[in-house]
Image: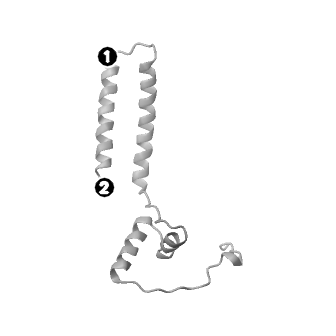
Amino acid sequence: MGRPKKPEDQKRNIKFTFRMTEEELRLLGSLCEVAAMPAADVVRSCVFKNRLPKAKVAKLDRQTYMELKRIGNNINQIAKHLNSKFEVSADRARAIDALSAKLDQIIKLLLHDR
């Protein structure tokens, strides 16, 4: 089964050529690499949407962010419990402090990784 055909008004059948310097070509190549898009799509985005395409986030980074989000949710639940009227043992309070410090270290490493 083949790919569905596009309507006539959506087909790109007109070719437009322009010249650029080697430096401009390198810049376009780096934009394509960062956005993980072909050059034609990058140029279309810049010309017609008047903005640079967004950088693709690596899969590992997405997984890291999702895990940090889960950790943050857990910390919020712990904070809610701590702020309630229930007593928390000293051992648990120390464990929470240690987790919070470790999370701060991870966030600092991620922010300074780039």
Please state the horizontal and vertical placement of residue 25, each as a whole percent of the image.
Answer: 38, 79
* Residue at the farthest front position: 50
Image: 41 above or below 75: below
In this picture, is 27 found above or below 90? below
Q: What kind of residue is marked 2? A: Arg
Q: Residues within 10 Å of mark 2 (few under 14, many from 20)?
A: few
Indicate left or right for 13 with 89 as reference. right
- Please name which of the two marks, 1 or 2, marks the residue nearer to the observer: 2
64 lies above or below 51: above
Question: Is residue 9 rendered to the left or right of residue 28?
Answer: right
Label 1: which secondary element = helix
Q: Are marks 1 and 2 in contact (CB under 8 Å)?
A: no
What residue sits 62% from the left and 83% below the top? Answer: 13
In the depicted structure, whether residue 71 falls above or below residue 24: above
x, y percent for residue 48: 55, 71
Q: Which residue is mark 2?
A: 114
